[in-house]
Amino acid sequence: MYAIIYHEDVKKDIKALGKNIAIQIFKKIEKVAKNPILGDELGNKANLDLKGFRKVYVDNKKVRIVYKIIDNKIEIFIIAIGKRDDMEVYKKASNRLDG
């Protein structure tokens, strides 16, 4: 099982989505920890370079968890969680990479 590492702002992402969705998020993260290649590869999304990252869905595909598999450390780095509306979650992920 892979260890889960969170970007420092992911806590805020989860809080903003509410308790019911948070429960779904943690259940999905648990599945990803056991099977990291569960998510779809991202690549270039709306001119945002997210190569090496993957996404999984929660809440009937309304919410995405964006993460990267770090095989040499047996870790999964979760960089952003949020809604796809206006590519919000992907922009957040890209900004956190740059920052």
Image (spheres, grey):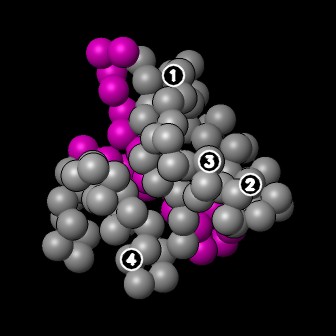
Please state which of the two labelled residues, at mark 3 or mark 2, is closer to the viewer: 3
Q: CA distance from mark 4 to mark 2?
A: 20 Å
Q: Main secondary structure of the magenta part?
A: strand
Rendered image: mark on residue 48: none
Question: Going by the picture, which residue comes out furthest to the front?
Answer: 99
Name the amino acid type tagged 1: Tyr
Q: CA distance from mark 2 to mark 1?
A: 20 Å
Q: For the magenta stretch, what is the residue range?
A: 52-73
Residue marked by disc 1: 2
The image shows residue 34, relative to residue 19, as above or below, that is above
Residue at the image position 18 percent from the left and 59 percent from the top: 49
Residue marked by disc 2: 22
Q: Assign a secondary structure to mark 2.
A: helix
Whole-percent x, y for residue 58 in the image: 63, 61
Question: Going by the picture, which residue comes out furthest to the top?
Answer: 73
Please state which of the two labelled residues, at mark 3 or mark 4, is closer to the viewer: 3
Rendered image: mark on residue 11: 3
Q: CA distance from mark 3 to mark 4?
A: 19 Å
Rendered image: mark on residue 87: 4
Name the amino acid type tagged 4: Met
Disc on the earlier residue, 3 or 2: 3
Whole-percent x, y for residue 96 in the image: 33, 52
Q: CA distance from mark 4 to mark 1?
A: 28 Å
